[in-house]
Image: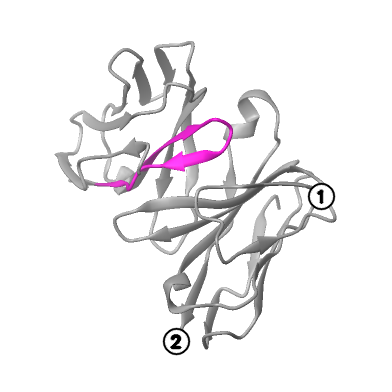
Amino acid sequence: EAQVTQNPRYLITVTGKKLTVTCSQNMNHEYMSWYRQDPGLGLRQIYYSMNVEVTDKGDVPEGYKVSRKEKRNFPLILESPSPNQTSLYFCASSLGSGRALHEQYFGPGTRLTVT
Amino acid sequence: DQQVKQNSPSLSVQEGRISILNCDYTNSMFDYFLWYKKYPAEGPTFLISISSIKDKNEDGRFTVFLNKSAKHLSLHIVPSQPGDSAVYFCAASDPGMRFGAGTRLTVKP
């Protein structure tokens, strides 16, 4: 089954404790992206990657890191989480060319709480 | 500064009637516009898109209209069905993606 998977689905952590949220897709997609969803703000793009070893900042990259060492994986790293990073996070992927670039498949979401 | 705005947080329509969801944007460099649908506890799913060089795209019950001079797009759902009840996000690409805050559509039987 074609899908985007994220782990963990739920995470409660404390300020300053480094964490990684994994994202994996099995559709051989070139484009991958991370978003956070907050009430009243919709989805905001954190980082995106057009291909392996190519990453670009979205609108809210501060406090996050990403890497794209292989096509199927795009982990999101919070080196020192803070309470304002409490949010619902989505990973997405797409074929990455032409019109198909924009038709993104989303994972189920990771709800992160930082206390 | 939100470049994509959905000014109606909610919309309620009767089954069988037309649903019209609206979206405004500020960046004239956007090259694609999209609508996504989201059910609770799930990720968004792609619904329909339109290139900036077109003014209309149709897919079954869903039609998206783009008015570049007004920097406005809309999604029409005809006829509306109870299963269409969800949050709808408008998005624009350059190629980073920018989403609106969403409109919760409720279709009443």
Q: Left or right of B106: which side holds A13?
A: right
Tell me the quarter of the picture where residue A101 sits. top right
**Circle 1 residue:** A71
Indicate the amino acid at tag 2: Thr
10 Å crowding of disc 1: few (<14), some (14-19), many (20+): many
Q: Is residue B70 left or right of residue B45?
A: left
x then y, percent, for residue A107: 58, 57
Disc 2 target residue: A115
Report the side of A77 relative to A35 (left or right).
right
Residue situated in front as seen by the camera: B48 or A74: A74
The picture quadrant where one finds residue A84 is: bottom left
Q: Quadrant of residue A23?
A: bottom right
Secondary structure beneath disc 2? loop
Q: Residue B70, relative to residue B85: is it above or below?
A: above
User: What secondary structure do most residues of the magenta stretch adopt?
Assistant: strand
Seen from the viewer's position, the closer of residues A64 and B98 is A64
Residue found 65% across the figure and 81% down from its top: A18
Q: What chain letter is assigned to the residue under label 1? A: A
Residue A77, given in percent of the width and then of the height, sits at 66, 69
Nearer mark to the viewer, of 1 and 2: 2
Q: Which residues are magenta?
A: B89-104
The picture places residue A2, in percent across and down from the top left corner, at 70, 50
Q: Do the residues bearing badges 1 and 2 touch, measured as CB atoms within 8 Å?
A: no
Q: How many marks?
A: 2
- What's the CA distance linking mark 1 and mark 2? 33 Å
Of label 1 and label 2, which has the lower sequence position? 1
